[in-house]
Amino acid sequence: MDREHSLQMLRQHISKQEQFTPETRPAVPLGAATLDDTLPDHGLTLGTLHELLPARHGDFSSTVGFGFGLATRILRTHPGFVLWAQPSHQVFRQGAVYPIGLTALGFDPDRLIQVSTPKSRDVLWALEEGLTNSALTAVIGILPENDNAYDFTASRRLVLRAAENGVTALLIRNQPAFEAATAAEMRWSVGAMPSVAHHRIGHPMPGLGTPRWQIEITKSKRGIPGRWPVEWDHETLSFRLATTLADRTPVRTPRVVRQQWATAS
Amino acid sequence: MLSDSNGPQPHSNNPFVLSTSLQNGEVLTAVNAAASELGLHKAMPLTDARAICPSVKVTPADLEGDDKALHQLALWCQCYSPFVRADLPEGLTIDITGCAHLFGGEVTLLKELEARLRRFGLTAKLATAPTIGAAWATARHVADKRPIITPETLHNTLAPIPISALRLGKPTVEALAKVGLKQIRDLLGKPRAPLVARFGSQLIERLDQAFDKHDESFCALTPPPPYRTEQRFAEPIMTLPAIEEVIRHLSHNLSAALNKAGKGARKLELTFFRVDGWPETLSIQTSALALSRDAGHLLRLLCEHLDKLKDHAGFGFEVATLNAFDVETITPHQEGFKNSDERRKNGGDLSRLLDRFINRFGPGNVTRFAPYASYIPERAMRAVPVLQNNSRHNWVEHAHALQGDVHFGRPFLLFPSPEPITTLSEVPDGPPLRFEWNRISHRITRADGPERIAPEWWTKIGENCHQTRDYYRVEDEEGRRFWLYRDGLYEHEGKPPCWFIHGIFS
């Protein structure tokens, strides 16, 4: 008993010393119970670095959308500002953040501070600066595909800075096959997913449902990787698991079966 | 004086002059010592000069360059006093009130200044006097080296000087000469009223100004800073660590001065004066959210641009000044009894972060969004520099006004300019079934729309797009969502309609 107690004391002491890897860390639940239970801290771990990658080429906007979804979740419980750092040349290729679109997620554009940098290396500088400031809640950085400034050392710096002040870093790298080892807490891969068709009478094509993403945790320091379809619930401003609807198309019965039915009745 | 070409040097022993063409022919604007000995002087026609000395070397003058160089020199002279003026075309005025003792008195100051100017290759005539007028006159007309006029000697010094030294217009001087008034002493003790009546009020005003009976002030080249710290070095410095150390020292001094007075500054200017008479200035603007006076913060802001300074160090810097502008009073607030760890946590001062971003990326690249009342998507919001945008906006209302009850009616990412796409199998008045963008084909499986956005009749969207746009939100079979629009109406004079992609949803 005494020995166990002292062991526990020691553990706590060590985790206090190691600022960046404490035993339990604050987290924000994403909303989907199945997903949250799988995550190591029962939600998105705060005060650390998360990498978001598109699952395929062309999924960049989905990744950004999911990233803003995460930021909205963080802002719900931790009010503050969000820093958005993007190389200026990226804007013309991938588009610029459109604040009116973000309001649909429940994200307040007033909370967004945009920094447009000349080079992608400056994005990392801006993120690092932002992480030292506790007026911010989250920092989001965009790195282009051909970037080579982001490596293990850079990620380690971000992780340490994030742990210091409890600011969460989301790094969106526009490169589906990014395999390099980094110090990031988690690596999420985000892909687009067809939404629920919204059938209406008189329209040739079904309408759009709420946005859906196929997310996959490809790397996690403490948790286990997994793959979930999620969609955004704009009523509760949270994620929920996307369930595929039942197939309601009428069953095609072969002619023989139909004749048998006819004779039977 | 500058010349256009790198021809003969003004210090050579051969006569050398600069000339410029006026209405009545070529006229000398400057002569060197050798030419002056031969009797050539300023404003002499070039033909006369050639007659006196046929071997004289002539180069066209660069008057604009002269003015620029004088301006630059005046800026450099700010290392002696913040009140400096360039007296075009050939003089400089420095107000050394309260500055002379820093250089060991007026005599030493003049000596040092002259030595320095000589090192730049300039021949200067210097004088100090209690008034601007007297200094102007003595520098130009007293033969002594570096005359220093005191209030006691003012009268005796000025008396034998020609009247033209009073900075009067040419007609006035000529009119005075006609009646036999040639020296300043001729004017002294004369009844003032007839003088004013005959020669204008300027004469008496200049006279009074020269004799310190009438105040005169001048507009400094750059507004003098309310707070200023400076440091002089025994040896010129040029290495980065040395410069950094100097900045550390200066910002520490400045912040101590500001703190003592309970003030904070919005603008800082760091100037390094080069040995060869060239000032290098770094200007730093801090955000509107907070006034800065913290030494550490100043240091970090200033050190951002050090590389630029180092590249321009030349033969080294000898003086450095740090000036604070736009100084305002800070309302003091208690920092708290907390320990340093907690203070660091709560001291997340957003304005400092923004200062650093602005300082590094420029004010235009650190922005916040502001809504704008327009239905045109690209005009409905503006990215405003944080310095000018610190109010709150009601975005939910704005979005509702634009898209009504539709959720996700606007994309997350918008292209600065819409990109054309190729559409296939179009339906009249409906979205296309297939489109190609960036050489990737997308088959549309879901679509919402159209949402018709008509142009504002009082303004054009762009150069060549001032038509109604029909927007569709579409999703391809992989689940990617795009915001497409058809430019113009479908049934438009038999021309196939143009389609564009304007944004991407999640």
Image: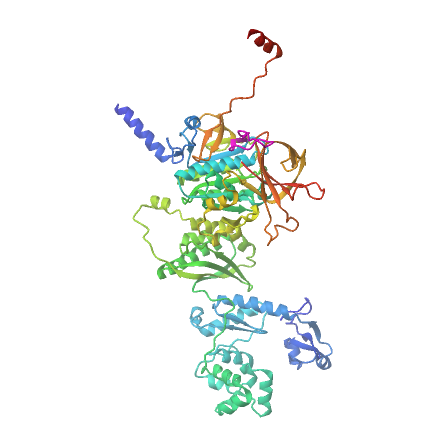
Residue farthest left in this picture: A2
Q: Which residues are magenta?
A: A190-212
| Residue occupying image coordinates x 43% and y 29% | A32
| Residue B277 at x, y percent in the picture | 55, 65
Q: Main secondary structure of the magenta part?
A: loop
Residue closer to the observer: A92 or A16: A92
**Colouring used for the render:** rainbow
| Residue B411 at x, y percent in the picture | 54, 40
Quarter holding the N terminus of chain B is bottom right
State the image quarter where residue A199 is shown. Answer: top right
Report the side of B261 relative to B418 (left or right).
left
| Residue occupying image coordinates x 54% and y 21% | A248
Q: How many marks?
A: 0
Q: Is B234 colored magenta in this rendering? A: no
Is B453 situated above or below B269? above
Is B388 situated above or below A101? below
Is B282 situated above or below B142? above
Q: Can the viewer see residue A157 in this picture?
A: no
Q: Is A211 colored magenta in this rendering? A: yes
Report the side of A19 relative to B239 (left or right).
left
